[in-house]
Image (spheres, rainbow, N blue to C red):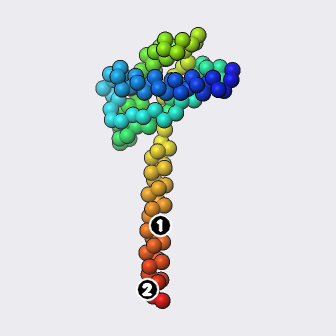
Amino acid sequence: MSTQRADRIGEAIKRLVSELLQRRLKDSRITGMVSITDVEVSGDLRHAKVFVSIYGNEESQKLTMEGLKSASGMVRSEVGKSLGLRFAPEIQFRLDTSIERGAKIAAILQQIKGERTDTDHDSAVNE
Protein backbone atom coordinates (compact mmCIF):
# COMPACT_ATOMS: atom_id res chain seq x y z
CA MET A 1 0.00 0.00 0.00
CA SER A 2 1.34 3.43 -0.85
CA THR A 3 2.23 5.79 1.95
CA GLN A 4 0.53 8.58 0.00
CA ARG A 5 -2.80 6.77 0.28
CA ALA A 6 -2.26 6.14 4.00
CA ASP A 7 -1.46 9.86 4.44
CA ARG A 8 -4.62 10.89 2.55
CA ILE A 9 -6.73 8.49 4.60
CA GLY A 10 -5.08 9.87 7.76
CA GLU A 11 -6.01 13.44 6.84
CA ALA A 12 -9.59 12.37 6.09
CA ILE A 13 -9.79 10.58 9.45
CA LYS A 14 -8.43 13.69 11.18
CA ARG A 15 -11.16 15.87 9.65
CA LEU A 16 -13.88 13.33 10.38
CA VAL A 17 -12.88 12.72 14.01
CA SER A 18 -12.65 16.48 14.60
CA GLU A 19 -16.18 16.88 13.26
CA LEU A 20 -17.44 13.97 15.38
CA LEU A 21 -15.92 15.53 18.50
CA GLN A 22 -17.57 18.86 17.81
CA ARG A 23 -21.00 17.70 16.74
CA ARG A 24 -21.87 14.12 17.60
CA LEU A 25 -19.86 12.78 20.51
CA LYS A 26 -21.90 13.28 23.69
CA ASP A 27 -19.82 11.72 26.45
CA SER A 28 -19.78 13.63 29.73
CA ARG A 29 -16.18 12.55 30.33
CA ILE A 30 -15.00 14.45 27.26
CA THR A 31 -14.58 17.96 28.61
CA GLY A 32 -12.57 21.01 27.71
CA MET A 33 -10.85 21.67 24.46
CA VAL A 34 -9.77 18.58 22.53
CA SER A 35 -7.69 18.96 19.36
CA ILE A 36 -6.72 16.26 16.91
CA THR A 37 -3.03 16.93 16.28
CA ASP A 38 -2.15 14.03 13.99
CA VAL A 39 -3.32 10.70 12.64
CA GLU A 40 -0.94 7.90 11.69
CA VAL A 41 -2.42 5.16 9.52
CA SER A 42 -0.64 1.84 9.01
CA GLY A 43 0.36 0.89 5.48
CA ASP A 44 -2.37 -1.77 5.27
CA LEU A 45 -4.97 0.78 6.50
CA ARG A 46 -6.03 -1.55 9.33
CA HIS A 47 -4.86 0.64 12.24
CA ALA A 48 -5.05 4.37 12.91
CA LYS A 49 -3.44 6.18 15.83
CA VAL A 50 -5.30 9.41 16.53
CA PHE A 51 -3.16 11.84 18.55
CA VAL A 52 -5.12 14.28 20.68
CA SER A 53 -4.12 17.33 22.66
CA ILE A 54 -6.36 18.00 25.64
CA TYR A 55 -6.40 21.35 27.37
CA GLY A 56 -6.93 20.90 31.08
CA ASN A 57 -5.48 19.37 34.21
CA GLU A 58 -4.25 15.80 34.46
CA GLU A 59 -7.56 14.50 35.85
CA SER A 60 -9.65 15.99 33.03
CA GLN A 61 -7.14 14.64 30.50
CA LYS A 62 -7.49 11.16 32.00
CA LEU A 63 -11.30 11.31 31.94
CA THR A 64 -11.33 12.63 28.39
CA MET A 65 -9.02 9.83 27.22
CA GLU A 66 -11.34 7.27 28.86
CA GLY A 67 -14.30 8.82 27.02
CA LEU A 68 -12.45 8.80 23.71
CA LYS A 69 -11.37 5.18 24.14
CA SER A 70 -14.95 4.13 24.88
CA ALA A 71 -16.11 5.95 21.73
CA SER A 72 -13.48 4.37 19.49
CA GLY A 73 -15.92 1.73 18.18
CA MET A 74 -18.43 4.35 17.10
CA VAL A 75 -15.64 6.43 15.57
CA ARG A 76 -14.37 3.37 13.69
CA SER A 77 -17.86 2.69 12.35
CA GLU A 78 -18.28 6.29 11.18
CA VAL A 79 -14.85 6.27 9.54
CA GLY A 80 -15.72 3.09 7.66
CA LYS A 81 -19.06 4.47 6.45
CA SER A 82 -17.76 7.90 5.50
CA LEU A 83 -14.58 6.85 3.73
CA GLY A 84 -15.97 3.76 2.01
CA LEU A 85 -13.07 1.55 3.03
CA ARG A 86 -13.32 -2.22 2.76
CA PHE A 87 -12.02 -2.50 6.33
CA ALA A 88 -12.48 0.32 8.79
CA PRO A 89 -9.19 0.88 10.63
CA GLU A 90 -8.99 0.12 14.34
CA ILE A 91 -8.88 3.50 16.08
CA GLN A 92 -6.48 4.09 18.97
CA PHE A 93 -6.51 7.44 20.74
CA ARG A 94 -3.15 8.63 22.06
CA LEU A 95 -2.45 11.66 24.23
CA ASP A 96 -0.14 14.11 22.46
CA THR A 97 1.84 16.17 24.95
CA SER A 98 4.08 17.87 22.37
CA ILE A 99 2.28 21.22 22.73
CA GLU A 100 2.81 21.18 26.50
CA ARG A 101 6.46 20.21 26.06
CA GLY A 102 6.89 23.01 23.52
CA ALA A 103 5.36 25.54 25.90
CA LYS A 104 7.68 24.42 28.71
CA ILE A 105 10.71 24.72 26.43
CA ALA A 106 9.60 28.19 25.30
CA ALA A 107 9.19 29.26 28.94
CA ILE A 108 12.67 27.97 29.81
CA LEU A 109 14.19 29.77 26.82
CA GLN A 110 12.40 32.97 27.81
CA GLN A 111 13.71 32.62 31.36
CA ILE A 112 17.26 32.08 30.08
CA LYS A 113 16.91 35.10 27.81
CA GLY A 114 15.75 37.20 30.79
CA GLU A 115 18.65 36.00 32.94
CA ARG A 116 21.10 36.70 30.13
CA THR A 117 19.70 40.23 29.66
CA ASP A 118 19.99 40.88 33.41
CA THR A 119 23.59 39.61 33.43
CA ASP A 120 24.50 41.71 30.37
CA HIS A 121 22.91 44.77 31.96
CA ASP A 122 24.74 44.22 35.28
CA SER A 123 28.13 43.81 33.59
CA ALA A 124 27.56 46.96 31.48
CA VAL A 125 26.74 48.95 34.64
CA ASN A 126 29.82 47.64 36.47
CA GLU A 127 32.20 48.67 33.67
The correct choice, above or below, for 35 with respect to 103 in the image is: above
Q: Where is residue 56 in the image (x, y as percent from the top left)?
A: 35, 41
Q: Give whichever of discs 1 and 2 has the lower sequence position.
A: 1
Which numbered marker is on residue 18? none
From where the camera sits, is residue 27 visible? yes
Residue assigned mark 2: 125
Name the foreground residue: 25 vs 57. 25
Asked if one can make out residue 42 in the rendered structure from this viewpoint, the answer is no
Query: Residue at 49% of width from left, 38% of height from top?
Result: 96
Q: What is the number of the mark on residue 113?
A: 1
Tell me which residue sits at (35%, 20%) in the image.
24
Residue 85 in percent (x, y) is at 57, 13
Near-viewer residue (102 or 57): 102
- Amino acid tagged 2: Val
Label 1: element kind? helix
Mark 2 secondary-structure assignment: helix
Q: How crowded is mark 2: few (under 14 residues within 10 Å), some or many (20 or more)?
A: few
Q: Distance of mark 1 from mark 2, alpha carbons?
A: 18 Å
Q: Taking 7 as reference, is 14 left or right?
A: left
Residue extending farthest to the bottom is 127
Q: Is residue 95 above or below residue 11?
A: below
Q: Residue at 48% of width from left, 35% of height from top? A: 37
Quadrant containing the N terminus is top right
Quarter of image, res 39: top right
The residue at the point 62 percent across, 24 percent down is 6
